[in-house]
Image (cartoon, helix red, strand yellow):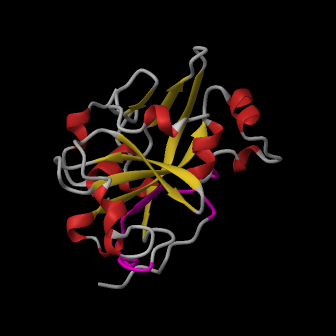
Amino acid sequence: MLRPPFFKRDPVKVAREVLGGTLVHVTEGGHRLTGRIVEVEAYDCPRDPACTAGRFHAARSAEMAIPPGKWLFWTAHGHPLLQVSCREEGVSASVLIRALQPLEGVPLMLDNRPVTRERDLTNGPAKLVYALGLNPARIAHRPVDSPELHLLPPDRPLPDDDVDMTARVGIAEGRNLPWRFVMKGNPWVSPAQPSMDLLSE
C-alpha cells in the first residue's frame, strides 16, 4: 500500500505518480472492489487560484489542511468526490481521483450503480464513489492505507508517452494549470473537457 508519508509533498507530483495505481475498497462483507486509476487532478492551495474561487472557496479548501495521507470528500452538485490530503498538516493540498478502470467486483459495482454501458460505471469522480459503495461518513479522515480503502502503486512507473497532461475540469480560476493527468487512450477516462486549453509557453 501507499503510506501517508508518500503524500507529504507536492500534490502535482503525487497525482502523476498515483496514475496507473489501484484503488481498493474492501466491503464490510469482505468483497473486493478495485479499479485502476486512469484520471487524477492536483490542488495545491498555496499557489492555486482555484482554492479561493468557485467550488474551492477558502472555507472549503481549509478542509484539506489536515495531516497528509488522509481520505477526504467534498460535495459538488450534491455528489461526494474522493480525494487524499497532501503536504504537511496546516497546508491545504490534495489529489482528486477522477476516474477508474474497473478491475475486481464489477457485478457488485453494477448493483451499486446500474448503467447501460460498463464504460460509464466509474468514468467520473462521483460515479466511482457510488460504484465502489463508499460511505463518506465512514471513510473521511481515515489514513490512506486503511484496510477498508487503500491505494496500491502502479506495477511500473507510467512513461510520459502514456500520459496526457491537461488543464483541470470545472474551475474558473487557475484553469490553465496543467494539473490533470490521464492515461492516454483509456476508455474509462471521464468525458469531461478541461476548463481551458493550456496556454502556450
Q: Is residue 174 above or below residue 65?
A: below
Q: Nearer the viewer, residue 3 or 75?
A: 75
Q: Quadrant of residue 67?
A: top left
Q: Is residue 111 left or right of residue 128?
A: right
Residue 137 image offset from top left, x and y in percent: 48, 36
Q: Residue at (74%, 28%) from the top-left corner? A: 107
* Residue placed furthest toward the top: 30
Secondary structure mostly taken by the magenta-highlighted segment of the chain: loop
Q: Nearer the viewer, residue 157 or 63?
A: 63
Q: Is residue 2 left or right of residue 171?
A: left
Q: Is residue 42 above or below residue 2?
A: below
Residue 41 image offset from top left, x and y in percent: 41, 58
Q: Residue at (32%, 39%) from the top-left corner? A: 70
Q: Is residue 27 above or below residue 170?
A: above
Q: Is residue 115 left or right of residue 27?
A: right
Residue numbers of the magenta segment: 172-191
Q: Is residue 95 magenta?
A: no
**In which quadrant is the N terminus drawn?**
top left
Q: Is residue 184 magenta?
A: yes
**In which quadrant is the C terminus drawn?**
bottom left
Q: Nearer the viewer, residue 88 or 155?
A: 88
* Residue placed furthest toward the bottom: 200
Q: Residue at (65%, 26%) from the top-left corner? A: 105
* Figure disc tally: 0
Residue 151 image offset from top left, x and y in percent: 40, 33
Q: Is residue 55 above or below residue 93?
A: below
Residue 146 image offset from top left, x and y in percent: 38, 25
